Amino acid sequence: MKAVHAHLPKPHDPYTDLVPPQGIKLTPKHYAYLKISEGCNHRCTFCIIPSMRGDLVSRPIGEVMQEAENLVKSGVKELLVISQDTSAYGVDVKYRTGFSGGKPVKTRMKDLCEELGKLGVWVRLHYVYPYPHVDEVIPLMADGKLLPYLDVPFQHASPRILKLMKRPASAEKVLERLRQWRKICPDITVRSTFIVGFPGETEAEFEMLLEFLKEAELDRVGCFEYSPVEGAAANALPDPVAGEVKAFRKEQFMKTQAAISRSKLKSKVGKTLTVLVDEPGIGRSAADAPEIDGVVRFKGGKAGEFIQVMIANSDEHDLHGRVA
């Protein structure tokens, strides 16, 4: 239609012509979520997303890149890549070649990341299922093309519980991959989420999860008590965990992680970090995603600008400093 409208002006549409090129978004001007696919091919027993949204459908890479470019032109400084399964991008179309800026580009996570990395803004990856090819994007983080930040929902450490969840991997493999990622990109921040009190989870399996947490030393962690969602296959599993036990395990889990987080953040004291200001006095470093992670606190700053902050002290969630 662009070729047609080059010769024949597009008729005015009072409903769509008022929409800016970057679309309408509900986030602040300086960051935006970039959705690259819908649906999921996995059948995790605690989840009902596939029954609600269907199997994975990847957006054409040219369309994704056009949206990203429009967002950057509108003043966005940080793109947060999201989907139900970011690392599966392109699987449904067999990594079909699309076009971005007139150049052929495969519909594949690494290729998309390489293109996004050329836009000159922060690019942050969320909801990355731990496929082996995720390892391919770590060098891009080390080279400064992507933020050194990876949101990977590991969910548990017990092989038996992971099998009941229909989740991949094992704690040993995860720990080895973490070591490799940190070797390639020492500044990488790894965020994850876990479920405690999954049906059948024993005390020994919960202790295994705590030991994994201590050894993995993840930077950011979320924890949820298992909740029976209507339609989830896990609801039919035997040996449900009592509510008070789930609550106690979550408390123990978060207490363990709090000590790790406090130590991780303390190691940043004395360093000068690049911070994207969200509002005067509050911003985020490369290690902090909006709304789910901690923040950097300081005096001054203007929303949407990058500043340098010397970190003076820390707690278990946030960093505190002064503008350098």
Image (tube, grey):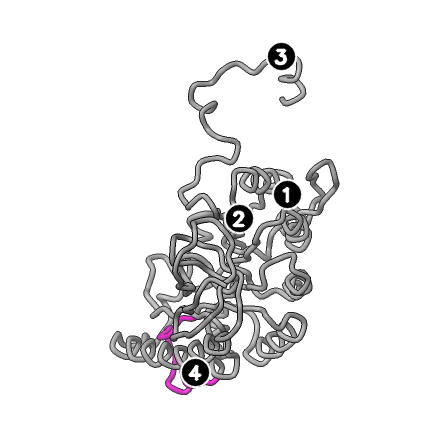
Q: Residues within 10 Å of mark 3 (few under 14, many from 20)?
A: few
For marks 2 and 3, the one nearer the N-term is: 3
For marks 3 and 4, the one nearer the N-term is: 3
Front position in the image: 10 or 94 = 10
Highlighted range, magenta: 194-211
- On whether residue 199 falls in the magenta region, the answer is yes
Q: Which residue is mark 4?
A: 210
Q: Which residue is mark 1?
A: 61
Q: Residue 183 in the image: x percent, y percent? A: 66, 75
Q: Which residue is mark 3?
A: 8
Q: Residues within 10 Å of mark 4 (few under 14, many from 20)?
A: many
Residue reaching furthest to the front: 324
User: SS for tag 4?
Assistant: helix
Q: Residue 207 in the image: x percent, y percent? A: 42, 85
Side of 246 where 2 appears, left or right: right
The type of residue carrying mark 1 is: Ile
CA distance for labels 4 and 1: 40 Å
- Front position among marks 3 and 1: 3
Q: Is residue 213 above or below residue 131?
A: below
For marks 2 and 4, the one nearer the N-term is: 2
In the rendered image, the quadrant that contains the N terminus is top right
CA distance for labels 3 and 1: 28 Å
Side of 15 where 69 appears, left or right: right
- Front position among marks 3 and 4: 3
User: SS for tag 1?
Assistant: helix
Q: Which residue is mark 2?
A: 77
The type of residue carrying mark 2 is: Lys
